[in-house]
Image (spheres, coloured by chain):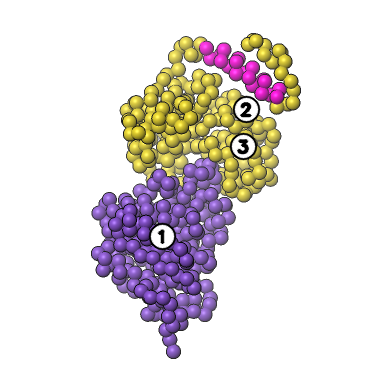
Amino acid sequence: MKLIICAGPATTGKTAVLRHLIRKLQARGQKPAFLKIDVQYAEEDEQFAREFGIPTRKVYSGELCPDHCNVMVLGDALQWASSANCDVLMVETAGLCLRCSPYVDGGLGLVVLEATSGMNLPLKVGPMLSLADVAVVTKIDRISQAEREVFRARIQDVAPGVRIREVNALHGIGIDPLVARVDAQADVNGPLLLRGNPPVGTCTICVGKKEIGWQSHFGVVRALENQTFYRGE
Amino acid sequence: MIQHVTVVGGHGRSGEPDGVERVEFAMGDVVAIVGPTGSGKTTLINDIELFADANTPTGRRVLFDGVPAPMEFRDDPARNPIALITQNTTFLSDLPVAEFLETHARIRCVETQQRASVVARTLAFANELTGEPISEASRMTELSGGQTRALLIADATVVCDAPIVLLDEVENAGIHRTRALQLLRRQRKIFLFVTHDPRITLLADYRIVMQGGRIRQVLRTDETERGLASAVNRLDDVLARLRDRIREGGRITAAEMEGVA
């Protein structure tokens, strides 16, 4: 099972990018599954199920931050995708506080940023950008080439190791290099670890316990199948 | 150094194929792209700038010296052979002009010690094209449409110094367009102008006529047209004088109309 985790601020075009990616992966005979993690509203799961006939789910994180929710449910979600005979799990998550990042070692981390969002955005989104594998820059048709290249420079200044892919997600332009990147991605294996250190706090994830799956955590947790519950003494 | 660029025909919006199998641009060519609004002129230059490889809505392919664009054209702006000046004349970035140009020069791999002079030359070039001068400290978002266009033309020429320059409607921006074309034509590059302007069109070696999203035909500028170019220029000069008079708050008199009325 390949794992793709796609993060990015609201309305940057995460869903549009994934839509093109799913279409192209399906055309190559791959079987994607899709999980959307959002705070209080999402309908991408229904859209994708209708458009592509693939297994989809959504989780409302509610009181939890979406990145914490992702840590809790991702282990279950991989099993769900596997039992649905899929070979790629795509997770779209709305990162919220910009202090965590949802990427997992062994998975492909995509951050979607819009070219129209201002030159300081790369400095503001923290590990959501710096710990990603690929920064996908959308809405490139809205700005001049010079401005696009300066935006690229600003990303490189913050995250020199992150590959930058400029796309026009409206017309699906620039998606092919992403498909090639997914092709080259290895399957996830064994116990999964969160890539970054969550900020200091008092919950088991915040204090640095990076194991994926609610079974490894205490306090207020949740599984894919139910609402939050208390686990511990 | 790239010697020629080829556009392999695709199709228009209704699926009807381009009227030519391919168009080839050789180094030094000046080409106009003409056609009614909505006919696909901007889409054609976007195809070129995106290094289309049958993966844009037109299905066109763009070849550089006969082969598709290598990945480094996309990955490294310093290797990108194309400078594109679009019709977007609003900047969204909130940087001061000097910092914007400095950052662009850096990613286009201008040596550190030359950057200050590149920024200064870019501003000087831009200020030859605008009425109201641009200062280093202006913020990009404060520039007028004409100032932005002038700065982008200067940026494409001085900072990018790319062998292929694509210009979308240079005449629409309230800049000295004949001056811009004179300055640009001093350089040996492939120039593609999207234009509605007869003077600019007759400067071109040939023009691509667009219709319904497809390339209808390619017309070489013929002897008759070349012979009429100076008359077209005189007519255009008269119009330019009228524009200047009106901008300066003057009145139109018979003196400005000399030679036409």
| Residue at the spot 63% in from the left edge and 45% down from the top edge | B141
Residue B145 numbered tag? 3
Q: Position of residue B96 (x, y in %)?
A: 64, 47
Q: Which-is-in-front pick, marks 1 and 2?
A: 1
| Residue at the spot 40% in from the left edge and 23% down from the top edge | B218
- Secondary structure of the residue carrying tag 3 is helix
Mark 2 and mark 3, same subunit? Answer: yes
Q: Dominant secondary structure of the magenta stretch?
A: helix
Mark 1 and mark 2, same subunit? Answer: no
Residue A43 numbered tag? 1
What colour is chain A? purple
| Mark 1 belongs to chain | A
Q: CA distance from mark 1 to mark 2?
A: 51 Å
Q: Quadrant of the N terminus of chain A?
A: bottom left
Residue B176 numbered tag? 2
Q: Is residue B167 above or below residue A7?
A: above
